[in-house]
Image (spheres, rainbow, N blue to C red):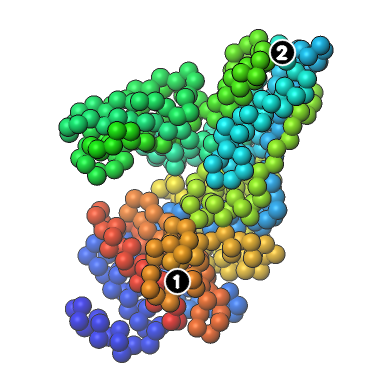
Amino acid sequence: MKLFLFILLQLSSPLEKFQQLLDSIQNDNEIQTGVVAASIRSTQTGEYKIQFNARKSVNSASTLKLVSTASAFSVLGPNYRYQTFVEYDGMIADSVLKGNIYIRGTGDPSLGSSRVGLDFQQVINLFAKKIKEFGIKRIEGFIIGDGSIFPDNSIANSWVWGDIGNYYGAGVSGLNINENLYEIHFKPGKSLNEDAPVLRLSPMLPNITCINKVKTGERGSGDNVIVYNTPFSNTIISEGTVPIGPSDFVVKGSLPDPAYFLAFYVQRKFQELQGEVTNEVISYQNFKARFKDSPKQRNLILSYDSPTISTLAQHCNFQSINLYADAFLKTVGYTLSKDASFEAGVKAEKFLWAQKGVDLQGFMIRDGSGLSPSGVLTANNLVDILFMMRRDSAFNDFYASIPVVGITGTVQNLAKGSKAVGNVRAKSGSISNTRAFSGYYTANNGELMSFAFIINRYSDGADRKVRRYLEEMVKLMIEL
């Protein structure tokens, strides 16, 4: 069978070869119960070169980030910047503020990230220092993290319980910090199944109880820890294994309340600078519940800008950062409807692309990152949005935000030694039993093509085989 397929491919045209490859993949014993979906479309003529199960709704995994970043470029523009404000209410007299300090976010997912701008500690230092320099030495009130521009429910209802406590399942607050993650440092034991105690949390999480059930696993087994928590929870549970060998093994978890966390550290730094605060930090939700009178006028101390959407989108697509993609979805929703829920973001993106003429039949997403297993779209949905984005004034910035096959991002090791290297820009995607690639490439005739390849619901244990198949598709499409 393999010899027959090899001979057939040698005798066929590039288009026939590609079709035969798709047929053979779909008929593979470990894939035949799932769906192979492929679509290739010229961004110049609009002609579809390939459509294979292209109207079947399948999981997109992280290729959905292309839709989120494209939407952000189209609605917000490449030069859009998030702003974070340090404000106060009440009166200042003799260096005493009789009122409160507010750190108010607008959804910036990069605040305090080590990737861009000021890192976590630098942001904390800046905010505390600016409060002190404003002439405030004593605060007779609270320091409050205000992320209320986004709903309190920071996670999508369709996310998996085992994901949301881990760093890649971090919820999106109106006030994010340090990409809403922290590190758990474990000390693996010297034998299998021995307890692996927690050495420390970094940064330390205030008022959190950590229940650790992690054991020691085989050498080289990697991170097999699941962290469980929910938004605003005071308890973190960790289960699974860490490998024998390292004296300090790091696992990343998601912050249950990033706005409170940021306020806590700003207050601590302010006190280190010899400032006084009469009250302990409380969450914005508790503050509102305790003080139900009408909102007081706030005055500006500091406005801090994020990098541009162009910069953030490149990090989102190159490093596949769920938090950034979901923040873009919520921001687009808020911009178009003043509602920053996941549902409003999805509705806004559907409105945007429908207005541009995209056929959205089968487009039933649940978030901006592709983390939701119930979110689906079609291969045609993806290539059609990419086709329409080619006509957007922000296209060049969007195109530059997509990793280059064989060179950058999560596809830097893909298709090495082939014509695809440097000629394809692609976003990868992977969740349980789904692998995908989508993006653009330049055909032999110079046309810029949009493409989407998704293999969905294949058998357990077939990940490597599926990736090889997808890699072969990426290599072969260059010849079309």
Classify mark 1: residues with Cα within 10 Å, few (<14), some (14-19) or many (20+). many
The residue drawn where x is 67% and y is 15% is: 275
Q: Quick check: 28 left or right of 163? A: left
Residue drawn at point x = 53 percent, y = 58 percent: 66
- At horizontal 82% and vertical 12% (from top left) the residue drawn is 93
Amino acid tagged 1: Val
Above/below status of 101 relative to 449: above
Q: Nearer the viewer, residue 70 or 114?
A: 114
Return the x and y of residue 413 as percentages of the image width and height.
39, 63
Q: Quadrant of residue 123?
A: top right
Residue at the disc numbered 2: 138
Question: Compared to 35, does 375 lie above or below?
Answer: above
**Residue 283 image position (x, y, % from top left):** 58, 21
Front residue of 372 and 358: 372
Determine which of the numbered discs, if any, sits on residue 421 in the image: 1
Quadrant assignment, res 340: top right
Residue shown at 53% from the left, 85% from the top? 445
> Residue type at mark 2?
Arg
Question: Whole-percent x and y of residue 260?
Answer: 57, 24
Q: What distance separates the C-alpha of mark 2 from that of mark 1?
A: 59 Å
| Residue 141 appears in view | no
Residue lying farthest to the bottom in this orientation? 11
Q: Quadrant of the C terminus?
A: bottom left
In the displayed structure, 377 sits above or below 282; it is below
User: Taking 351 as reference, is 419 left or right?
Assistant: left
Q: Say which label, 2 or 1, has the lower sequence index.
A: 2
Name the one closer to the observer, 383 or 207.
207
- How many marks are shown on the rendered structure? 2
Label 1 secondary element: loop
